[in-house]
Amino acid sequence: MKSLRLLIPVAIFALIGWFLLKGLDRDPKLVPSPLIGKPAPAFSLPVLNGEGNWSPAQMKGKVWLLNVWASWCAACQVEHPLLNDMARNQIVPIVGFAWKDKRDDSVAWLKRHGNPYSVVISDFDGRAAIDWGVYGAPETFLIDRDGVIRYKQVGPFTPEIIRDELLPLLKRLGAR
């Protein structure tokens, strides 16, 4: 009887441990966003250069990317040359979403690394990013002509992701 009482807590502990370990081998980038297939959340944020506010409604009728980045983000620096290439080749309009960053730091970073964005908006306190489900940088959303989120990239783009995932999706959505 005593061994049964001891066995039950040990079995429960082992089961919980198994579930925790199973969760650790999952790639967090593969967690699907609940926003895919839903309208992009509305917001109005200041434009980095100080020329008023900007909202996603201004891109209605266009296929576009919203790229969440920050000057303090090391992975953003890795991804940035690819964004510069996409902008140079006019693949798709890219809106920069400076997340939890100081204005002067964002401006200096763009001067140093290039500015692939058609517009850069600033979410200094990170409140607008919450509605988009942002939990890190970089994160990139693809929005269609109707303002619906069609794709989310967690982490930096790679040439392979752009070639194998983004470009085919842009083609299906009729971008350019």
Image (cartoon, rainbow, N blue to C red):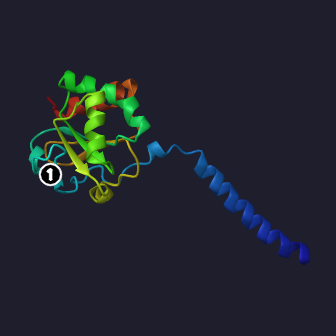
Position in image of residue 25 (x %, y %): 59, 44
With 3 as the anchor, is 91 left or right in this view?
left
Local secondary structure at mark 1: loop
Position in image of residue 173 (x %, y %): 19, 35
Q: Residue at x 19, y 57 (%)?
A: 43
In the picture, the quarter occupied by the C terminus is top left
Q: Residue at x 16, y 32 (%)?
A: 174
**Within the image, what quadrant is residue 175 found in?**
top left
Position in image of residue 52 (x %, y %): 10, 51
Bin the neighbour count of mark 1 within 10 Å (Cα to Cα): few under 14, some 14-19, many 20 and up: some
Q: Amino acid at mark 1?
A: Ser
In the picture, the quarter occupied by the N terminus is bottom right
Q: Residue at x 26, y 57 (%)?
A: 128
- Say if 98 sits above or below 157 in the image: below
Position in image of residue 19 (x %, y %): 64, 56
Along the line of sight, the residue nearer the viewer: 134 or 164: 134
Q: Residue at x 38, y 32 (%)?
A: 77
Along the line of sight, the residue nearer the viewer: 171 or 124: 124
**Within the image, what quadrant is residue 76 found in?**
top left
**Within the image, what quadrant is residue 66 found in?**
top left
Q: How many marks?
A: 1
Q: Report if residue 62 is visible in the image.
A: yes
- Say if 160 sits above or below 151 in the image: above
Kindly identify which residue carries mark 1. 55
With 37 as the anchor, is 34 left or right in this view?
right
With 40 as the anchor, is 17 left or right in this view?
right
- Pick out the residue farthest to the right: 2
Q: Report if residue 68 is visible in the image.
A: no
